[in-house]
Every structure is written in C-alpha cells, then in structure tokens.
Image (cartoon, grey):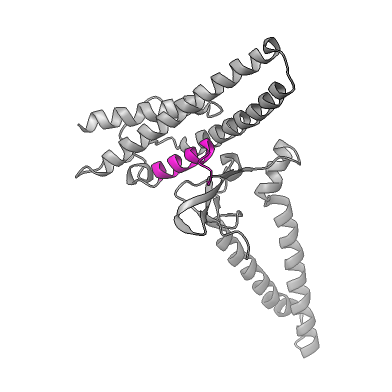
Amino acid sequence: MGEQWTTTSTPTLLRRNRPDDEGEAAAYRVYDPGLLAGRNLSLTAAGKTESPYDVAQGLGMIALLAGSAIVAPIVFSDGGFWSTALWVLAGSGAAFVVLMVLFFAFVRDPFEAYRRRHGQNASPFVEVDAADGSRAGTLCALAESITSTAAWRDGAIDPERLVPETLWSAVRLAARVADEQGRLADDERRGTSERVLEPSRTELAAARSDLEHIERNLREIGRIAREIDARPTGAAPGTVSGPTTRTAESAVAGTDAILAQSQALRDMLR
C-alpha cells in the first residue's frame, strides 16, 4: 500500500499520519503556492492539482464529441447505414483531434509549467519529517492550526492569505539551516579553524533567530485566531486589513504582517 497522504486546512499542505497514532503527523509535504496560481487550482491527497473547471471542460468535450457524431451524418450522409456510420466516426474523430489540439495548446499541466519556470530539476514541494519534532514540522503544525480556525477560513485573520506563502519560505529556511548545521559539524570534525568557521556560525545564528521569530509569530497568530473563534459574535471577513506584505520570500515579514493584522482585529473586537 502506498503512502496515505491527506489534504489539510492549509491549501498547500498535505500530511501523513503516524500509523500508531492517527492524531499525530508523521510527515508533511509543503507545496510552493506558485504551483496553484491561476485557474483556481487546489491540491488533492494524491499530490495532483484539480480545478472546478475540470468538470465543465470534461462535459464540454463530451458534448462536442456527441454533437459532432450527430451533426456530421445529418449534414453529409446519404441516409444509408454504412454512410451514416462512417460519418459518425469521421465527425467524432475530427472533433477529438480538435479537442486534443486545443487541450495541448491552452491547458497547461501546472507541474510542467512550474518546471519550465524554475528548471527541470525544481521540485514544487518539500517533504518534512515531523516524527522527530523538527522545527519545520512544528511550523507546518502551527500553520495547519491557524488555517483550521473559523477566523482564518472566513478571512477575518490573514485576509491576504499569506500563511501558505510564508510557510513555504519558512520550511525552506529550516531546511537550509539543517543543511548548514550538518556542513558546520563536518568542518569542525575536520579541524577547520575558528576564523574560517565564524562567518558560517554568524549566518547560522541569524537564520535560527529568524526561525524562532517565525515560530513565535505563528503561535501568537493561532492563539488570537482561536480567541476570536471563541467570541460569541465573530468578525466579518476582511474587517481589518492591517499592514500586509506580498513579499513572502521573507517569512519573517510575512508572519509579522499577519500578526499585526490579527492583533489589530483582536483589539478592535475588544
């Protein structure tokens, strides 16, 4: 049996539960929000994308094929059985060819489009082992806890929907920190001088500080969201916009913006 991933309240996050405890995540898979940009795409548990337009497109293809199979013999057949059958096949075949040309010309596979933008070896997701209590796993759990609240779903908290973007940036930062820690440990074992190691230590300390800042922000955002959920009357979607940023390359800036908006909304409701 393959890996059993499930979707979560975070649009760009899948999770796999521990086999012995379904309430705890064994792993997360965090997707780049850019993969889902356009066409109102969403993730499936299989790690594929789907769109509400897919059904309409499928019905349209069926209608065109059926219409061609009906119209062609009416227009061109001489009324004989074989003539009608041949024109049914010809009409259906021509419609199928047209549909395939249109499909490959205008309907782009999101994963292929992503690789064209970022390189053929680029992965649109990062897999996070949450079983060992990693920092990246903690960030995923915090993001999921925020997006599972009614305040987030209704748009009262984070109306700009920065959580998925900041989570993607934060998880990649956590991965870089883990890699850098490993390289630094290897250099120390090889006896590299402290003078050479100092710049790496400084950079690593700054990155760790950023991750701690992001985690604190996410915890506070989740606490405020749950506090708003517990109120007798919730906030209307988009009641307070607050300071926001679309530059989610900085997860620190993204979570700062969400936290500021959340605090402003909470203070207004008091």
Q: Residue, x 38% and y 34% (percent of image)?
A: 219
- Residue 201 sits above or below residue 258 on the image: above
Q: Which residues are magenta?
A: 131-147
Vertically, is 16 above or below 130?
Answer: below
The reply to whether residue 230 is in sight is yes
Determine which quarter of the picture holds residue 89.
Answer: bottom right
Q: Is residue 244 visible?
A: no
Furthest residue to the top? Answer: 195
Q: Residue at x 73, y 67 (%)?
A: 95
Give residue 239's position: percent from left, percent from top.
30, 35
Membership of 146 in magenta stretch? yes
- On screen, residue 64 versus residue 136, left or right, reads right
Q: Between 169 and 202, which is closer to the camera in this rendering? A: 202
Residue nearer the viewer, 139 or 79: 139
Say if the magenta span includes residue 262: no
**Image quadrant containing the N terminus:** bottom right
